Image: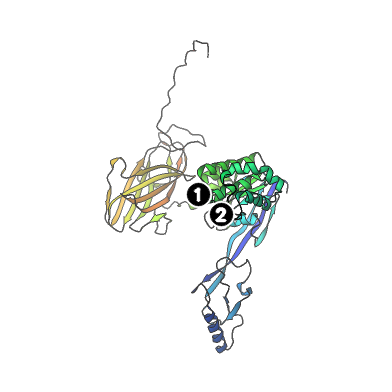
Amino acid sequence: MGDVVIRVEGLGKKYRISHQRKERYTALRDVIADKVRSVFSGGRNSGGDVVNLNNQTDMEAAPGKDVSDDKFNFSKDPGAPSSASVEDFWALRDVSFEVKRGEVVGIIGRNGAGKSTLLKILSRITEPTEGRVELDGRVASLLEVGTGFHPELTGRENIFLNGAILGMTRAETRRKFDEIVAFAEVEKFLDTPVKRYSSGMYVRLAFAVAAHLDPEILIVDEVLAVGDLEFQRKCLGKMKDVSQHGGRTVLFVSHNIAAVKALCTKGLYLDRGRMESWGSIDGAVTEYLHVGAVAAFAGSIPDDFPRQISTGEAKIRRVHIVDSLANPVQTVFTGEPINIRVRWEVHELIEQGMVEIGIVDADGRQVTQSLSCDGGGPSIPMAPGLYEIGLRIDDIVFPGRYSLLVGVHKMDGATIDFIERALDFEVLNTGKGDTNHYPSKVRGYLRPGQQWQALSRPEPDQGGMQ
């Protein structure tokens, strides 16, 4: 394979899903009644629907296997109402890519996009339905809390057990033992059964073993979210170290876009089981955020728009940015203010309320927040009806893509309606009256009001220093 350590060609994974229409199980009396009914209907039971006594639920049947192959099945009269329907579900379909040695690949996508299924196939936990995977080197994976650990064994014993599962000899594990323990910070509990560990301790020890036993390919799922912030930083640093200095390949799944961009060199974006973007991490992230953004829709928020919190007492109906002529826009130039309008509809009387508007950057970090009651502003009595409010934010952000988060709250802090990404917009470099020219990539979060002043050249110090 040369420098290519992972080759995926036409990969697909199909599950057979059963949907229970009436009952979650089939009772013996129902089976007997169905058999009697089939006798009186002339024995027309060949080729009928299938009643599954094994009670297989979603995704338990093997790919491509019909549930009628199960051992304890009885045929059922075609005219009788079926208790379950079966359909095929493709968790992955037509995925192809190559990963070279030493690359760090970020795999991103929404829940249910197929990320974990892909990692399980690459880890040889699950077999694909179609396509092929070629791996060159030993694979260490951390997919779920406690994977590869025996709860009754101590931390010390599980280090050797996990090392053996990953293909390491006892001598190799012993040589790395002290580094693993120091990294995981579990010395005090090393001889305690891991069933008494917290989920965070589980993850620390599992990651330490996987990262220190010299795998050629390290696969890490979202489990790092369980650890504390300091340990997450250690893990990200370790993954960067093993890729840059150890020449090892890392596949990293996370919803933390900032961490993905900081660590990864390449990106794979999955959506509904299909590969939508493969290449640079910036390109994959841009595609991922673009698909989740609201299109240029003049700011209307429909009822089925994703809302993080909604009590039904009021609903946000419209969010837009306007120019000097009050026309909706989705681009703003540096040097110009951002004029935001929010319209909401109240369904039930709210004695005193307030509106929240915030700006979030492309990595999901909140840049700023403003509440309508800030600075002694009045609370808003909300009788049933439509309301609109405006906010002007002076030029404070660098060029780039941003989102507006919008919320309607009661004065006691209770949230009535809240949308994390109500509108995407872009800040472009230089506009009317703006003499600032920024490089294509700038660092930081805000553009504070500032002024540089040219000073006279200082005189040399008495000691002769220039």
- Label 2 Cα crowd, 10 Å radius (few <14 / some 14-19 / many 20+): some
Nearest to the observer: residue 42 or residue 447: 42
The answer to whether residue 278 is above or below residue 240 is below
Q: Which mark is residue 195?
A: 2
Three-letter amino acid code of the residue under disc 1: Leu
Q: Position of residue 290 (x, y in %)?
A: 50, 50
Q: Position of residue 452 (x, y in %)?
A: 43, 26
In the picture provided, is 240 more to the left or to the right than 361? right
Direction front: furthest residue: 191
Nearest to the observer: residue 264 or residue 280: 264
Three-letter amino acid code of the residue under disc 2: Lys
Q: Which quarter of the picture shows residue 57?
A: bottom right
In the picture provided, is 163 more to the left or to the right than 189? right
Q: Position of residue 67 (x, y in %)?
A: 60, 72
> Which residue lies at the image location 63% right of the left edge and 41% below the top edge?
179
Give the residue number, with chain letter if any, for mark 1.
289
* Residue 226 can be seen in this image: yes
Instruction: Tell me the element at label 1.
Output: helix
- Label 1 Cα crowd, 10 Å radius (few <14 / some 14-19 / many 20+): some
Direction right: furthest residue: 2
